Amino acid sequence: MGQNGKRVALLMGSFNPIHRGHLAVAQYVVTQELADEVWLVVSPQNPLKNPALLAPFADRLAMVRLAVEETGDPRLKACDVEAALPQPSYTIHTIEYLREHCPDVQFSILAGSDIADQLPRWHRSEELRRLVRFLIYPRNHGTASPEMAEAPLFAVDSTSIRAALAAGLTVADNLVPSVVRDYIYSKKLYTMDDMTLGEWSDAIERAPNEAGNYFARGCLYYRQNEFGPAMNDFTRTLELEPEHTVAAQMRELIREIFSFRNFDLYNP
């Protein structure tokens, strides 16, 4: 590894879709000079995620390119390297490929603090930790690296954004860049959520403190006009993540529906 070469932090993920949280942490890294560039590496297939829930790779890559371009920061770059590698996308294979083809670049991996529980499940994880440095940013109340402790923390995730879009809710610009949102609409992405209420309930049973699961189930309830259970799930989402903007927006929308119903019933 070239110790005096360019320093590149790799933010690797499905970006299904990319959101402001991804961009904010990438910009933090270059602003704090923890790396010279951040490459947002779009994974065709994450081995730990259900491929049926992924938008096509070409669309996810296009959204990352649009989002990066909108920032106007040349230090942020979309990267499609994993498209040429065997699938599913194992991080160790990507690192080996990049080290071979970019011998003068010093690579690190930028990952959320919730990665701590998952890292042992990664293919050849011990070898990977010997090859690259990890920059861990705060997410879901996990422990960040000291140099990343002040990185911005966004109470938003791609699962919640997909669920909101599936429910027909307009996602605000402060959560998803408008160019990405427009692309999603033009391509009719995320118009349906493939998981059923039962499957989301199973996911909640497995991870009872994962706010995104409650939010996704709440959106599905909302889409089926089951507003009471939806309200309960959005409330639980906000108990776990008080700054979850979209959940607050959805809960307020249901309150307006209830208010209208009461007015209609008791004030004819």
Image: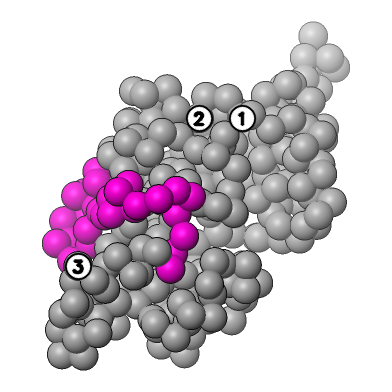
Which residue is depicted at the point 45% across and 48% down?
87
- Assess whether residue 96 is covered by the magenta stretch: no
Q: Is mark 1 on a helix, strand or loop?
A: loop
| Residue under numbered circle 2 | 190
Q: Where 9 falls versus 237 (above or below)?
A: below
Which residue is depicted at the point 85% across and 17% down?
266
Say which quarter of the image contains residue 76: bottom left
Local packing at callout 1 (Cα closer than 10 Å; few below 14, some 14-19, many 20+) is some
Local packing at callout 3 (Cα closer than 10 Å; few below 14, some 14-19, many 20+) is few
Mark positioned earlier in the residue sequence (1 or 3): 3
Pick out the residue farthest to the top: 268
**What amino acid is labelled 1 in the image?**
Asp
Residue 103 image point, x, y percent: 19, 77
| Residue 101 tag number | 3
Mark positioned earlier in the residue sequence (3 or 2): 3
- In magenta, the rendered stretch is 65-92
| Residue under numbered circle 1 | 193
261 with respect to 98 (left or right): right
Residue 178 image point, x, y percent: 32, 39
Q: Is residue 31 visible?
A: no
Foreground mark, 3 or 2, reads 3
